[in-house]
């Protein structure tokens, strides 16, 4: 793969993640599906990239998504940077055990990413700072998963398109 | 798996930790002011967020309405029930207020005449026809009501009981053609006969007959029950003189009376079951 193509591919990934975050904080925050807003599109994008590209690329996508989230979301201070990088690495690691690379397996990765994000959130904010109730934090996860899964095909389709354009998508 | 164990991603983890630390330190040092990284992303994101928000605002009303529909429906149902409940309470309060007025009147009348025994009753139907003007009450013989009992309100005499059932009774009003009672003009103390008249009944009025030619009766005089004959208690206002006319034969005069009770707007009445005859 040409260096130029790789650069463009990553620029497109970055743009896709950037737009996902913008949409999450504006348009999608008004929509409630099963009582939850679809606010996990960014870790989903990281998960799809990690599945297609491997550990290093997954971690890199997680780093960009995390820094961007920390910069744009209130009171995060590095939480998302650590969490999304961890998600990228974890999902690429899981891919070694799940041989199918399809949309349905990405939903499994989305669930894993959401669970990891929530556990780390609990450790960061609830265990360290002693805020809130842990049960309510995890009870909302199924609804949040379903709400995100409805919009997931769009992200999946776009990541696959970018990967295919860059010559990576044959196996996807 | 090979790539995973090559640990080339470790460098990214280190960068991530470093970036997180810088962000945390920046936040702590600046005391909440934005870091340069945050500033950069916000500069890039702000115009796009603004554009998306303006588009969203146009459609958010629709989504909000959609989300709130069930909530509003439930709230609407609850409010309807609450309104119906409040209206029922209001009706009950009005009913109680009317009954209270009735009882006050009864008490007032009873103060004047201790022998009076009342029964409060509600008008359940009106027999307003071309042939008569009657009411049906929700009380009857089981409540001690009997034929010829006098029926009154705070304003004066309504009529008398003409029929009695077990739990119902019919009131023949003072304007009905069946009405005939000995009456007295309050001011002049002249005795006459208050009676219903077919033609006057349709105008909601009745007649005071057998007034002597020399009578000083004038428009505005009040007419009350005389108590003669022992049928009705003495001193209950029956009506007010509207007009005084001479009979065709010229021997006596008659007066057209309007009842003091507004028959269209009464719901509750008092039936005088017992009284001491005083003539």
Image (cartoon, coloured by chain):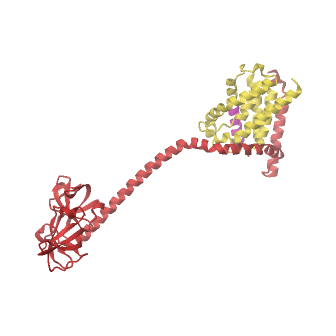
Work out whether residue B145 or residue B193 is closer to the camera in this orientation and state it. B193
Q: Position of residue B9 (x, y in %)?
A: 83, 29
Residue in the picture at 38% in, 55% down: B89
Q: The chain shown in yellow is which?
A: A
The region drawn magenta spans A113-125
Work out whether residue B191 or residue A112 is closer to the camera in this orientation and state it. B191
Work out whether residue B111 or residue B247 is closer to the camera in this orientation and state it. B247
| Quadrant in the picture for residue A66 | top right
Q: Position of residue A125 (x, y in %)?
A: 70, 43
Residue in the picture at 82% in, 23% down: B3
Predominant secondary structure in magenta? helix
| Quadrant in the picture for residue A17 | top right
| Quadrant in the picture for residue B130 | bottom left
Q: Position of residue B151 (x, y in %)?
A: 21, 63
Q: The chain shown in red is which?
A: B
Quadrant containing the N terminus of chain B in the rendered view: top right
Residue B191 versus residue B5 in the image, above or below: below
Q: Residue pushed farthest right? A: A3
Whether residue A88 is visible here, answered yes or no, is: yes
Residue A160 versus residue B43 in the image, above or below: above
Residue in the picture at 69% in, 24% down: A103
Tally of marks: 0
Whether residue B118 is visible here, answered yes or no, is: no
Quadrant containing the C terminus of chain B in the rendered view: bottom left
Residue A102 versus residue B38 in the image, above or below: above
Does residue B223 appear to the left or right of B1 in the view shown? left
Residue B138 inside the magenta-drawn segment: no
């Amino acid at each position: 793969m040409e260096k130029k193509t790789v650069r463009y591919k990553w620029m497109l990934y970055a743009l896709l993640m950037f737009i996902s975050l913008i949409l999450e904080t504006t348009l999608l925050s008004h929509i409630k599906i099963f009582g939850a807003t679809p606010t996990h599109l960014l870790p989903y994008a990281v998960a799809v990239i990690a599945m297609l590209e491997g550990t290093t690329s997954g971690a890199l996508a997680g780093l960009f998504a995390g820094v961007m989230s920390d910069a744009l979301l209130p009171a995060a201070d590095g939480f998302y940077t650590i969490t999304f990088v961890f998600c990228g690495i974890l999902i690429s690691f899981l891919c070694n055990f799940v041989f199918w690379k399809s949309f349905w397996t990405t939903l499994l990765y989305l669930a894993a990413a959401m669970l990891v994000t929530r556990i780390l959130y609990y450790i960061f904010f609830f265990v360290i700072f002693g805020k809130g109730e842990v049960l309510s934090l995890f009870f909302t996860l199924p609804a949040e998963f379903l709400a995100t899964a409805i919009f997931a095909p769009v992200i999946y389709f776009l990541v696959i398109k970018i990967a295919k354009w860059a010559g990576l998508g044959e196996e996807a | 798996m090979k790539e995973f164990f090559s640990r080339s991603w470790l460098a990214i983890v280190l960068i991530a930790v470093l970036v997180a630390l810088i962000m945390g330190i920046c936040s702590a040092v600046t005391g909440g002011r934005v870091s340069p990284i945050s500033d950069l992303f916000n500069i890039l994101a702000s115009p796009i967020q603004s554009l998306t928000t303006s588009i969203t605002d146009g459609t958010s009303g629709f989504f909000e309405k959609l989300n709130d529909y069930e909530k509003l429906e439930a709230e609407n149902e609850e409010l309807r029930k609450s309104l119906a409940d409040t209206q029922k309470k209001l009706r009950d309060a009005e009913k109680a207020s009317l009954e209270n007025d009735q009882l006050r009147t009864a008490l007032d009348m009873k103060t004047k005449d201790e022998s009076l025994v009342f029964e409060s009753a509600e008008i359940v139907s009106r027999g307003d026809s071309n042939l008569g003007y009657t009411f049906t009450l929700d009380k009857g013989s089981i409540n001690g009501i009997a034929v010829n009992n006098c029926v009154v309100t705070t304003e004066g005499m309504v009529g008398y009981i003409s029929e009695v059932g077990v739990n119902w009774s019919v009131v023949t009003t003072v304007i009905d053609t069946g009405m005939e009672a000995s009456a007295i003009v309050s001011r002049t103390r002249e005795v006459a006969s208050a009676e219903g008249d077919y033609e006057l009944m349709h105008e909601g009025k009745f007649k005071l007959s057998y007034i002597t030619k020399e009578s000083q009766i004038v428009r505005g005089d009040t007419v009350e029950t005389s108590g003669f004959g022992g049928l009705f208690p003495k001193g209950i206002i029956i009506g007010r003189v509207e007009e005084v006319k001479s009979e065709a034969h010229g021997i006596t005069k008659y007066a057209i009376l309007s009842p003091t009770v507004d028959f269209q707007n009464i719901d509750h009445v008092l039936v005088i079951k017992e009284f001491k005859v005083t003539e």
